[in-house]
Image (cartoon, rainbow, N blue to C red):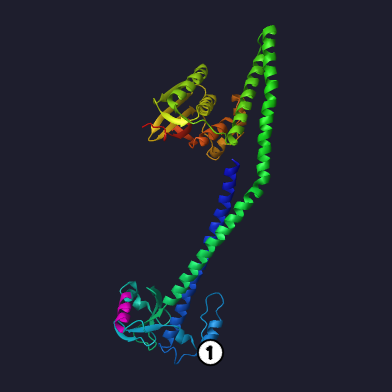
Amino acid sequence: MVRKMKWKFIGSVMGSIVVLLIIVWGSMYLTQQIQMTDRYDQLLSLVLENNGEFSKSFDVNKAVQDSDRRIWQYALKVTKDTPYENRYFLVHLSDEGEVEEVNIEHISSVDEASARKMAQDVLSGEVKELLTEITDDMDRVGTYNTFRYRLAKDVDGTGYVIGFADMYQQIQNNLYIQGLTGALAIVIFLILFLIVLLSAKRVLEPLILNMEKQKQFITDAGHELKTPLAVISADVDVIELTEGKSEWTESIRKQTVQMSELIKRLLYLSKMEENVQFVMNNLNLSKLVDEVVDRVSPIAVSQNKSFKKEIEKDIVIKGDAGALEQLISVLSENAVKYCKEEGEIEIKLYKDGKTACLEMRNSGDPIDEKIMPRLFDRFYRPDSDRNKKTGGFGIGLSVAKAIVLAHKGKICAQNEKKEGKDIVAFCVELSMRGTGGK
């Protein structure tokens, strides 16, 4: 259990770190994309305003002043070298969207035919339908392969112009940075994993020590209580022999039996948490369930509760006979204990593929869905008054869960309806693999 707790702690911490690293990496990626598109949008805006003659008639000083005014968004820092650091071209269009002129002076990787095709591809989409909406104060931006484009009214007031800026180098730079930060994140993750792995035991040491003391206390107390309970039981026998049975001796005997059962289950649960190795053998689960149920059914019948069983024959699983007998006993006794007066108890065992399914149902008030996951917690009792009447201690289901988990199975509780009546069901799934059965 300590080992499991340690890895659960490491998993929780490393999971949080992974989420944090993903958020940081994702934020950097998103910031890069926004920065890149914003940069080229501003660049194209300046180019289109100057009719493509970025290097000749562009007022650098004014652009620098305008860029310095930007505070909350990316600001294109314009210098005298900016026109030579960027590759772009323009395609002039008529009012109907037909290509009239292509300016590829500022790029060498694109010829006129390619520029025309790119413009036609852009206009073939929904943008062509929006040409009528383009005004002097309104334009359209988008991405075409590794180019950022901007569609706007031509500066001479007639027709339109599409400016394309090559983002290839910027994209490659971004990919390199993303790969580098990804690799750095993996290195950070591995370093932190090593640190958490080495420090986990020290961090959990107070909790582990407390759990060890608790288990030792349960073991010591259990063994110490066995002797006085045996003495009390013997004294009751003597009293009944000399004075005869009475309601007082019956009460003492009943409480002694309940206390003995509690001690037995506490010691059993304590051993389970110490990772006691079960003796796993092929066993006939059908016969085991049938035997245990036959011992419990008379109790139900004596309380005017109907008892039904549907047990499929020759279901073989690999498990510990003593532990599984304890599991079946806990669940069947629990079903009898909490079944309504004149209610119905149903026990089913059947195969579902390579899984043996054991289901225990009893008529009873539905369990609150909020507390359903806590039913298997040690000493948890959702209704203390009810448990006082039935003699429950809130330990049986935790023992059942420990046994199921030790057999790598599943156990759950659920509310059902049958003919308008409330039914409480406990379902166990145990693997039949490795038994040689079909």
Residue 126 visible in the current orientation: yes
Instruction: State the residue in front, 409 or 37.
Output: 409
Residue type at mark 1: give it.
Answer: Asn
Residue 33 visible in the current orientation: no
Whole-percent x, y for residue 98 in the image: 29, 82
- Helix, strand or loop under label 1: helix
Which residue is depicted at the point 69% across and 10% down? 238
User: Please, what is the dominant secondary structure of the magenta stretch?
Assistant: helix
Pointer 1: what residue? Answer: 61
Indicate whether 380 appears above or below 14: above
Instruction: State the residue in front, 251 or 352.
Output: 352
Check if residue 116 falls in the magenta segment. Answer: yes
Identify the residue at the far bottom of this view. Answer: 56
Whole-percent x, y for residue 304 in the image: 50, 18
| Residue range highlighted in magenta | 112-121
Mark 1 surroundings: few (<14), some (14-19) or many (≥20) residues within 10 A: few
Indicate whether 312 appears above or below 126: above
Whole-percent x, y for residue 359 in the image: 45, 30
Indicate whether 194 appears above or below 34: above
